[in-house]
Image (cartoon, rainbow, N blue to C red):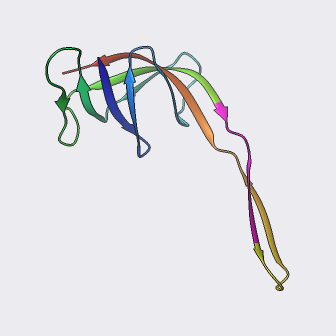
Amino acid sequence: MYAIFEDGSHQFRVSEGDLVTVDRRDGDDGDEILFEKVLLIAGTDGEPTIGAPVVDGAQVVAKVVRQFRDKKIVIRKFRRRKGYRRKRGHRQSFTTVQIVSIKTA
């Protein structure tokens, strides 16, 4: 059984036990997170349930495994012959979650 859910304008195809890295969510290690914007649920038998736009009453339950920040990227701006230089850095925050269960209505 697998599901496709949307979080932070990204779509993820997951099964139970999968590890997924999503944008930063509040919570400590071991906390549960519910993803309620489930777009599709498919089992091993029969037809998949496709939402219009979401499947009513469906949820993906996940457990927080790790909070971390990605490596730094450097943004440089430069205009030749103008004396214009800018340097800026950015580190994106992420949360790794493990899928515990997929619930249907």
Q: Residue at x 18, y 26 (%)?
A: 48
Answer above or below: position of 44 versus 75: above
The N terminus: image quadrant: top left
Q: Residue at x 72, y 40 (%)?
A: 71
Q: Is residue 4 left or right of residue 55?
A: right
Give the prevailing secondary structure in the magenta stretch.
Answer: strand
Q: Residue furthest left?
A: 46
Foreground pick, 54 / 40: 40
Residue 104 coordinates in the image, percent (x, y): 22, 20
Q: Which of the 4 image quadrants contains residue 28?
A: top right
Q: Residue furthest bottom?
A: 81
Q: Is residue 18 left or right of residue 94?
A: left
Q: Residue at x 81, y 73 (%)?
A: 85
Residue 93 coordinates in the image, percent (x, y): 62, 39
The stretch of residues the image draws in magenta is 68-77
Foreground pick, 74 / 63: 74
